[in-house]
Image: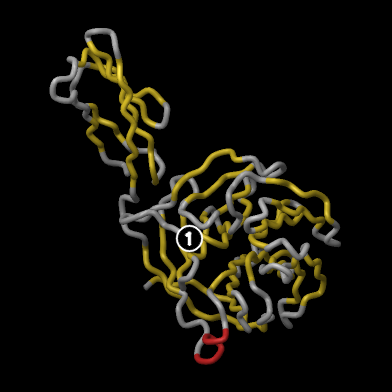
């Protein structure tokens, strides 16, 4: 990403002579010329897979279309971070945490599993739910985002989002979306950002959850699969990586992984053995405090990020 990429096409042995070539990248015209190499300057592009299309016109007037994919990776390795525990709070070990939001002194939590999924308002100091609404038994709760005074909760494979009034959890709407699965969700002030367990970030309309655009998240080596719970923090997108003790810091404009936070060691011994994976990031916008927890974890942590 940021480098010049050489694109070339050649006719097969015995094929007609190519008169001219038209090149397209992601459906946009790049250059038309004779059968010579073309330079694509990737500066300003996003990471991930890009569609390269060559239309070859022969002297006979016939033409062929050749399509290929090219993955652009981040130009530099991510910065490495670890953490310092600032405060420890109790967390319900029965809560299969899928989404976490902090607002005006309270945690809002989406929990999963069929027959156990819920939306909760939680007392930070005690870990006790103050208010709970249960999802229908066939629904599997997932990511959660706060948009103005509304809470939006995804489901895993049901392709339904629930929209609640924040102050009393009154159900305002059910919205169907097209993504195969719902995983993480957050709000950047303009769009909802959603994951589906792949390396793809979906930018969605905040009212209808219609897809606006998408990009693939990459570091300097590969695409970042299994992106899960999300939080938008100071212009960056923070993402849990499923089945790992890693939180990624992502540039949501480019898809570049800016940093990698090693969160291992938060739980130890029997607590770790009885718990599930790390999942849950929340930020208090007023104080900048960051909270993390996991699925069926007995504790929630206020952390400070430090460089390695």
Mark 1 surroundings within 10 Å by alpha-carbon count, few (fewer than 14), some (14 through 19), many (20 or more): some
How are the residues colored?
Answer: secondary structure
| Residue extending farthest top | 60
**In terms of image quadrants, where is residue 95?**
bottom right
- The answer to which image quadrant residue 280 occupies is bottom right
Residue 302 versus residue 288 in the image, above or below: below
Secondary structure state at the residue bearing disc 1: loop
**Residue at point 33% right, 23% down?**
65
Where residue 206 sits in the image (x, y, percent)?
68, 44
Residue found at the very far front of the displayed protein: 14
Residue 176 screen position, x and y as percent: 70, 46
Q: Nearer the viewer, residue 118 or 78?
A: 118
Q: What residue is at 36 percent from the left and 26 percent from the top?
A: 24
State the image quarter where residue 223 is shown.
bottom left
Out of 161 and 192, give the one closest to the viewer.
161
- Quarter of the image with the N terminus in it: top left
Q: Residue lying furthest left in this view?
A: 13
Left or right, residue 46 beside residue 161: left
- For the C terminus, the image quarter is bottom left
Residue beneath the point at 65% across and 66% down:
100
Q: Is residue 186 left or right of residue 262?
A: right
Count of marks, rendered view: 1
Residue at x 51%, y 57% (from the top left corner): 197
- Horizontal placement of 246 versus 150: left or right? left
Q: Position of residue 58 (x, y in %)?
A: 24, 13
Q: List the residue tagged with mark 1.
A: 226
Q: Residue 11's spot in the image, x, y percent? A: 19, 23
Q: From what the image shows, is residue 272 above or below residue 145?
A: below
């Amino acid at each position: 990403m940021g480098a010049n990429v050489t694109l070339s096409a050649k006719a097969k042995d015995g094929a007609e002579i190519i008169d001219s070539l038209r090149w397209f990248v992601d459906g946009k015209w790049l250059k038309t010329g004779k059968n010579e190499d073309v330079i694509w300057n990737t500066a300003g592009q996003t990471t991930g897979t890009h569609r390269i299309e060559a239309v070859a016109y022969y002297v006979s007037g016939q033409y062929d279309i050749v399509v290929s994919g090219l993955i652009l990776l981040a130009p530099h390795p991510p910065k490495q971070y670890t953490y310092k525990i600032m405060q420890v709070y109790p967390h319900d070990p029965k809560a299969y945490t899928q989404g976490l939001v902090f607002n005006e002194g309270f945690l809002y939590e989406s929990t999963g599993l069929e027959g156990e999924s819920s939306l909760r308002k939680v007392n930070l100091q005690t870990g006790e739910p103050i208010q709970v609404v249960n999802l229908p038994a066939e629904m599997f709760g997932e990511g959660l985002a706060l948009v103005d005074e509304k809470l939006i909760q995804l489901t895993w494979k049901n392709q339904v989002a629930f929209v609640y009034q924040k102050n009393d959890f009154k159900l305002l709407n059910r919205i169907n979306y097209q993504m195969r699965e719902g995983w993480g969700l957050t709000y950047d002030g303009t769009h909802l950002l959603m994951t589906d367990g792949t390396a793809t970030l979906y930018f969605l309309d905040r009212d209808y959850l219609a897809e606006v655009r998408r990009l693939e998240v990459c570091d300097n080596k590969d695409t970042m699969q299994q992106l899960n719970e999300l939080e938008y923090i100071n212009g960056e997108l923070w993402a849990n990586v499923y089945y790992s003790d890693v939180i990624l810091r992502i540039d949501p404009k480019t898809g570049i992984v800016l940093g990698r936070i090693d969160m291992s060691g938060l739980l130890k011994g029997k607590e770790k053995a009885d718990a599930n994976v790390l999942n849950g990031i929340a930020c208090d916008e007023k104080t900048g405090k960051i909270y993390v927890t996991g699925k069926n974890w007995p504790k929630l942590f206020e952390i400070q990020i430090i460089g390695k």
